[in-house]
Image (cartoon, rainbow, N blue to C red):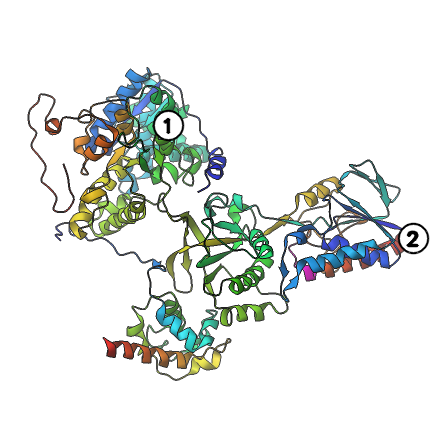
């Protein structure tokens, strides 16, 4: 039996390995030149500050399994279903067949340009959380004028929980990412003032709330409950921001030397395309809809097509890997069933 | 300056964080790091004996302090009855009573020096 | 500031502006406080650009001031506006060009309301017929007069006699624009650049050689807000808003402020005097104020009109420092003389704000 997996990010890699270990043949398709997906852009992971590239390396290493065939730089151009089998035509001419199809197309980050009023791409000292990760990788933090920032603000919920960007959902991870990044920043900038502007602190995972607490007490990160309403640039290229301090009930303004936008998650363009090609329904949050939120979290409205990872909702890496293992189990059950 | 208009320029309500003096809050945080842990839940002010009888709001008070809005502090602080009920409910273990005493001491020292 | 980022987004905010044959709707405030502005607009359109503009003597206020201060009901203002449309129709025009952003906002709001609620349009037609026996067609194109100047900014640049440059240093003049809430914030898509990326005035400024300053409070209200200003008790809010803007723009040392809205021109000009008397603060160079021009006045100066002919002596803040920078000649003695050369008398000197 063989399974076709589209997307070799963490979910695709983990599911491929689990299925391969169980004796299934796996065709793993990835549009980029290397596997790893969004993990390639990260420096350290919450909550244990594990090196993202170390985890990535481990996931990729396991793709050397003899049951896995990796197709890098490939995209499906056509997906057909013939006599209970899926036929996937790739852009390099190859034709793959399999009894089950697993979509692990993942998420993409919100394009911060769309939130015009925050000035990303216009004001010099506005960056995204991803760019900050790159700064961490290079261990170099400075403003556009080449100075060490004295005050840095993290803006939560950029492109999340925001009707104005057509994203009603919570991206879940940005709160804890902001806390993690604020701590990392404190280690590099011991004297700087670091503030997080949040709407709610959603510390859902194990160890997250503890990390939040530590950020406050040990790392002296300040938290202001209020959504950024306007940002502008002053003569010194600092960012002048306005928010309400909702716990006081007064408007608040301050200048920041660096403003970090915690960009949210959206269904990736690749996942969207796959949904259109295969007729998979989308949920109201724009992600792919699972068949049942409790009993069939990896199944879809299309028989034989499964989902793994953040194409079905925003997920952290722990949940993504768990979801991938769950998808592998679900697919094995399915294959047994069609075997009969 | 003359004013024959019958009105004057309205003061902005906005918290001007750049201009505000946050040194008292800094001192407090150095002395008592637990005061950094407040998450604004309001447990303290809900149970507060003084807050049920007066405008005293201990949650808001320490937030104002952190933003450098210290104008009201002096008027408000003495309303605290030091009963310590807030200590019992705080989910983050902020030593609220000690915080009040510290602020009292600081303010009286400031008064003494001026 | 990364300009490419801005330009990318400006492209999303373009609007259609008619090319000729305009029906002109005057502004109550502009023709009272800056009468030279409207005269200059008509002269530029007619004599410099060769366009047909109909300045209709039968036209009245749109009642926007009353509407926004809750004394004119919506049915009344709709009927008054319907009468304007009827006058335009009768005169054989289809392109409505109000000279006031509040009128522009009101026309836009009413047309939008009629689109959403056709029964209100029917009702208004009935009211107008009963009251005046008139009928109307809705404008084919609605543009604010600054949109029209913006459209022809390059044609004006081709005829310009003076540039927005300091002739002594060659430095482009640093200009603060103020586009006005009723132009940009009520229906952002109807204004060039919306409120986020206001381009209507800054487009003229750059076309004529100046540079636009993007300062933090650029989008903030001047503080007019009809109910704020009309009610004495609220006037402190009004001036506080202007003050906030002055404080935010001052570090950039602007050479002048250009305004879209008649009310903003008045408040940004006259509040500088009020603030100086109340607090002793001035915002321009050396104790002077920051000159405030309407866009028509700016266009007229660029085209070589005489400063006193276009009414610059009506401004509270002296414009002479700006004229000197641009190298525009003027006769100081003629400032307060009327068309016959008779002395009109001089205004009193402020206590702190320096004037010529």
The answer to whether residue C355 is left or right of residue A316 is left
Could you say where residue A168 lies in the image, as x and y percent from the top left?
56, 51
Count every numbered label the image shows and give the total.
2
Q: In which quarter of the image is residue C265?
A: top left
User: Based on the displayed image, in which of its 4 quarters is residue C253 positioned?
Assistant: top left
Few, some or many residues within 10 Å of mark 2 (<14, 14–19, 20+):
few
Chain ID for label 2?
A: A
Residue A162, percent from left and from top: 52, 50
Left or right, C311 with respect to C348, comes to right
Q: Where is residue C73 in the image (x, y as percent from the top left)?
A: 30, 39
Q: Nearer the viewer, residue C354 or C219?
A: C354
Front one among C160 and C52: C160
Question: Which residue lies at the image location 51% right of the left edge and 72% below the top edge?
Answer: A218
The image quadrant where one finds the C terminus of chain A is bottom right
A204 left or right, relative to A19: left
Residue A242 — which label? Answer: none
Mark 1 burial class by Cα count in 10 Å: few <14, some 14-19, many 20+: some
Does any portion of residue A320 appear in the rendered image?
A: no
Residue closest to the eye, B45 or C81 = B45
Q: Are marks 1 and 2 on the same chain?
A: no
Checking the image for residue C207, the label placed there is 1
For disc 2, the marked residue is A339
Is A314 in the magenta? yes
Query: How far from the left and from the top, in percent, is residue C276?
Result: 18, 48
The magenta segment is A313-320
- Please say whether residue C116 is visible from this viewpoint: yes
Dot 1: what SS?
helix
Disc 2 is placed on an element classified as helix
Mark 1 vs mark 2, foreground winner is: 1
Is residue B61 inside the magenta stretch?
Answer: no
- Chain letter behind tag 1: C
């Amino acid at each position: 039996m063989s399974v076709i997996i589209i997307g070799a990010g963490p979910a695709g890699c983990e599911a491929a390995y689990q299925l391969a270990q169980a004796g299934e043949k796996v065709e793993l398709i990835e549009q980029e030149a290397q596997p790893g997906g969004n993990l390639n852009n990260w420096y350290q992971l919450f909550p244990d500050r594990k090196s993202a590239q170390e985890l990535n390396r481990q996931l990729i290493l396991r793709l050397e399994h003899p049951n896995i065939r990796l197709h890098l730089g490939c995209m499906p151009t056509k997906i057909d279903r013939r006599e209970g089998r899926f036929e996937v035509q790739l852009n390099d001419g190859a034709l793959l067949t399999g009894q089950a199809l697993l979509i692990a197309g993942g998420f993409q980050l919100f394009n911060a340009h769309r939130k015009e009023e925050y000035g990303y791409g216009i004001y010099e000292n506005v960056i995204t959380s991803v760019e900050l990760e790159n700064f961490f990788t290079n261990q170099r933090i400075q403003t556009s004028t080449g100075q060490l920032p004295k005050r840095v603000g993290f803006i939560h919920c950029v492109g999340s929980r925001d009707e104005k960007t057509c994203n009603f959902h919570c991206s879940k991870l940005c709160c804890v990412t902001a806390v993690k990044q604020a701590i990392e920043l404190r280690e590099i900038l011991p004297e700087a003032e670091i503030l997080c502007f949040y709407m709610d602190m959603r510390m859902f995972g194990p160890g997250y709330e503890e990390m939040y607490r530590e950020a406050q007490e040990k790392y002296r990160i300040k938290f202001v409950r209020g959504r950024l309403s306007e940002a502008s640039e002053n003569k010194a290229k600092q960012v002048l921001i306005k928010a309400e301090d909702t716990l006081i009930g007064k408007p608040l303004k301050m200048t920041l030397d660096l403003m970090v936008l915690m960009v949210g998650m959206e269904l990736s363009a690749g996942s969207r395309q796959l949904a259109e090609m295969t007729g998979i329904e989308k949920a109201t949050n724009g992600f792919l809809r699972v068949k049942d939120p409790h009993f069939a979290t990896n199944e879809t409205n299309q028989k034989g097509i499964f989902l793994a990872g953040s194409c079905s909702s925003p997920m952290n890496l722990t949940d993504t890997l768990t979801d991938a293992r769950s998808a592998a189990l679900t697919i094995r059950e399915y294959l047994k069933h069609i075997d009969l | 300056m003359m004013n024959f208009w019958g009105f004057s320029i309205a003061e902005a309500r906005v918290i001007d964080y750049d201009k505000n003096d946050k040194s008292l809050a800094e001192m407090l945080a150095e002395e008592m790091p637990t005061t950094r842990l407040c998450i604004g839940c309001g447990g303290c002010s809900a149970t507060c004996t003084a807050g049920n009888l007066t405008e005293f709001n201990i949650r808001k008070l320490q937030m104002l302090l952190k933003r450098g809005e210290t104008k009201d502090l002096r008027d408000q602080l003495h309303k605290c009855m030091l009963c310590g009920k807030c200590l019992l409910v705080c989910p983050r273990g902020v030593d609220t009573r000690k915080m009040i005493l510290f602020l009292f001491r600081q303010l009286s020292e400031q008064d003494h020096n001026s | 500031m990364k300009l490419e980022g801005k330009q990318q987004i400006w492209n999303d905010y373009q609007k259609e502006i008619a090319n000729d044959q305009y029906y002109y709707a005057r502004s109550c405030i502009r023709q009272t406080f800056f009468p030279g502005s409207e005269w200059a607009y008509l002269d530029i359109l007619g004599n410099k650009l060769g366009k047909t503009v109909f300045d209709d003597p039968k036209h009245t206020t749109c009642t926007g001031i009353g509407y926004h201060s809750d004394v004119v009901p919506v049915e009344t203002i709709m009927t008054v506006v319907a009468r304007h449309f009827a006058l335009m129709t009768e005169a054989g025009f289809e392109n409505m060009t109000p000279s006031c952003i509040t009128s522009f906002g009101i026309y836009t709001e009413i047309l939008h309301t009629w689109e959403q609620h056709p029964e209100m349009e029917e009702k208004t037609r009935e009211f107008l017929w009963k009251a005046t026996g008139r009928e109307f067609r809705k404008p084919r194109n609605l543009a604010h007069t600054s949109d029209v100047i913006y459209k022809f900014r390059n044609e004006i640049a081709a005829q310009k006699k003076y540039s927005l440059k300091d002739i002594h240093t060659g430095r482009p003049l640093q200009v603060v624009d103020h586009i006005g809430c009723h132009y940009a914030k009520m229906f952002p898509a109807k204004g060039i650049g919306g409120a986020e990326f206001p381009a209507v005035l800054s487009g003229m400024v750059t076309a004529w050689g100046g540079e636009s300053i993007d300062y933090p409070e650029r989008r903030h209200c001047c503080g007019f807000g009809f109910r704020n200003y009309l009610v004495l008790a609220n006037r402190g809010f009004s001036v506080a808003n202007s003050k906030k803007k002055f404080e935010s723009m001052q570090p950039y040392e602007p050479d002048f402020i250009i305004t879209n809205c008649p009310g903003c021109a008045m408040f940004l000009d006259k509040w500088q005097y009020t603030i100086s008397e109340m607090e002793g603060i001035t915002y321009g160079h050396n104790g002077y104020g920051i000159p405030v021009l309407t866009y028509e006045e700016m266009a007229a100066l660029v085209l070589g009109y005489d400063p006193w002919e276009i009414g610059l002596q009506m401004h509270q803040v002296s414009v002479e420092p700006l004229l000197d920078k641009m190298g525009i000649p003027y006769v100081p003695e003629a400032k307060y003389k009327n068309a016959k050369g008779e002395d009109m008398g001089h205004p009193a000197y402020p206590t702190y704000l320096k004037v010529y």
